Image (cartoon, helix red, strand yellow):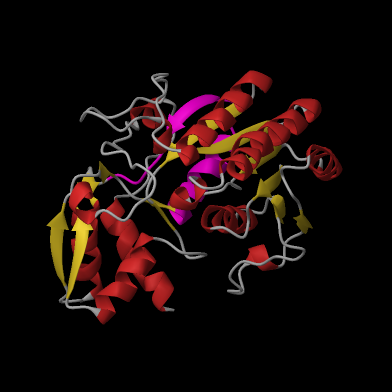
C-alpha cells in the first residue's frame, strides 16, 4: 500500500512517515519547504521520497498526488498557530479550508482514501459532557476552529472514502509543543501559572500515527476522536505530571483562563473527546497519556 503524507515537517506528519517505514509501506512526504525541513534525527522520514507542495495551489496538489498515485493520503498539513490565526484569517482559511478541499478533490479524482486530521476546536467547548464523533453541533470559537471545520466539511462533501480524526493537545518530537514549553519554563522559574479550567486529554503523535496507519488499512470510514487514554485533565494537572516525571521541583499554581489572560483567541473549556467509537470499530485505543508522557520524555532526552 502506498501513502502520500502532507505536513511531514510537523509533529504528526513526521511520525506518520516513520510509522509507514517501520511497517514496510511506501510513503511520499510533502511540505512547503523545497527540501525536508523537519528534525534530522536519522529516522526514515529524512530519507523517504519528499515533494515540496503548497496545498493552497489546486493545480500543484492535483499534479503531485496524481504523480504519486497513492492508495491513501494522510493530510497532516495545517495552520495551527491559534492566536496568530486571528490576524491572518484569509491566509489561514486558504490553508485549512482551501488546502484541504484541494487535497480532497485530488483524492476524489484518484479514488483513494483520505485521512483528515481535525481538532476539538470545531466545537464551542461548553459544558462537561464529552463530545461525540458524529456530533454536528459545531460552534467554533476562533478562526482556527472555524477553518478546520470548513476543511472537515469539504472532505465530507467531496469524498466517500474518508476518515475525519479529531485530536487535541498534541505533542511529538518534531516541533514545538506544550511539554517542551513547560520543561523550558520549569528550568528557569521556581513557580509557573497554568490554567486549570480547560479540560481535555493529550495526544502523543507517535501513538496516533500507529492508529492512523491502522485506519488506512480498513474501510471503516467516518468521524473519529483519538487522544490518549488515561482520563480527562486540565493543563494544570498535565503540567504537574510533566514536572513530576521530569524530576522538577517547580511549583505549579492553578489559575483560571480569565486570570491567565494573554491569549488572543478564545479557547474551549471543554475539550473532552469521546473515543468509544474507536473500540466499537475494532481499533486499539491509544495508551494512557501518563505512559505516553513517560516514553516521550525519554525520547527527547536522547
Quadrant of the drawing holding the N terminus: top right
Task: Determine whether 259 is above or below 96 in the image.
Answer: below
Q: Residue 153 colored magenta?
A: no
In-image side of 59 versus 298 (left or right): right
In the image, the segment drawn in magenta is 205-229
In-image side of 180 versus 36 (left or right): left
For the residue pair 150 and 239, the one nearer the viewer reads as: 150
Toward which corner of the image does residue 112 lie, by quadrant? top right
For the residue pair 99 and 165, the one nearer the viewer reads as: 99
In-image side of 21 versus 107 (left or right): left
| Percent of width and height locating residue 167 | 42, 41
For the residue pair 1 and 248, the one nearer the viewer reads as: 248
How many discs mark residues in the rendered view? Answer: 0
Q: Residue at x 75, y 66 (%)?
A: 35
Task: Determine whether 236 is above or below 108 in the image.
Answer: below
| Percent of width and height locating residue 182 | 30, 68
| Percent of width and height locating residue 291 | 29, 58
Quadrant of the drawing holding the C terminus: bottom left
Toward which corner of the image does residue 121 lie, by quadrant? top left
Toward which corner of the image does residue 123 lie, by quadrant? top left
For the residue pair 154 and 163, the one nearer the viewer reads as: 154
Q: Residue at x 39, y 37 (%)?
A: 120
Q: Residue furthest front?
A: 87
In-image side of 20 versus 4 (left or right): left
Q: Residue 217 colored magenta?
A: yes
| Percent of width and height locating residue 111 | 76, 26
Amino acid at each position: 500500500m502506498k501513502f502520500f503524507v502532507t505536513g511531514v515537517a510537523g509533529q504528526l506528519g513526521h511520525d506518520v512517515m516513520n510509522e509507514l517505514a517501520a511497517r514496510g509501506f511506501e510513503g511520499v512526504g510533502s511540505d512547503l519547504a523545497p527540501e525536508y525541513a523537519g528534525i534530522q534525527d536519522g529516522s526514515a522520514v529524512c530519507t523517504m521520497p519528499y515533494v515540496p507542495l503548497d496545498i493552497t495551489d489546486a493545480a500543484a496538489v492535483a499534479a503531485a498526488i496524481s504523480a504519486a498515485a497513492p492508495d491513501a493520503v494522510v493530510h497532516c498539513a495545517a495552520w495551527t498557530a491559534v492566536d496568530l490565526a486571528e490576524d491572518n484569517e484569509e491566509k489561514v482559511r486558504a490553508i485549512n479550508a482551501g488546502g484541504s478541499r484541494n487535497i480532497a478533490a485530488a483524492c476524489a479524482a484518484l479514488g483513494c482514501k483520505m485521512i483528515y486530521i481535525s481538532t476539538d476546536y470545531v466545537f464551542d467547548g461548553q459544558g462537561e459532557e464529552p463530545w461525540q464523533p458524529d456530533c454536528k453541533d459545531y460552534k467554533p470559537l476562533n478562526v482556527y476552529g472555524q477553518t478546520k471545520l470548513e476543511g472537515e466539511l469539504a472532505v465530507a462533501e467531496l469524498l466517500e472514502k474518508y476518515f475525519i480524526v479529531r485530536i487535541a493537545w498534541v505533542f511529538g518530537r518534531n516541533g514545538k509543543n506544550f511539554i517542551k514549553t513547560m520543561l523550558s519554563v520549569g528550568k528557569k522559574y521556581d513557580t509557573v501559572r497554568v490554567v486549570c479550567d480547560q479540560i481535555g486529554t493529550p495526544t502523543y503523535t507517535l501513538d496516533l500515527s500507529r492508529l492512523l496507519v491502522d485506519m488506512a488499512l480498513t474501510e471503516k470510514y467516518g468521524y473519529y476522536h483519538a487522544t490518549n487514554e488515561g482520563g480527562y485533565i486540565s493543563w494544570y494537572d498535565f503540567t504537574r505530571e510533566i514536572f513530576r516525571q521530569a524530576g522538577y521541583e517547580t511549583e505549579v499554581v492553578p489559575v483560571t483562563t480569565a486570570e491567565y489572560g494573554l491569549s488572543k483567541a478564545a479557547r474551549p473549556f471543554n475539550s473532552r473527546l469521546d473515543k468509544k467509537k474507536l473500540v466499537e470499530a475494532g481499533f486499539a485505543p491509544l495508551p494512557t497519556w501518563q505512559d505516553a508522557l513517560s516514553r516521550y520524555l525519554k525520547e527527547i532526552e536522547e
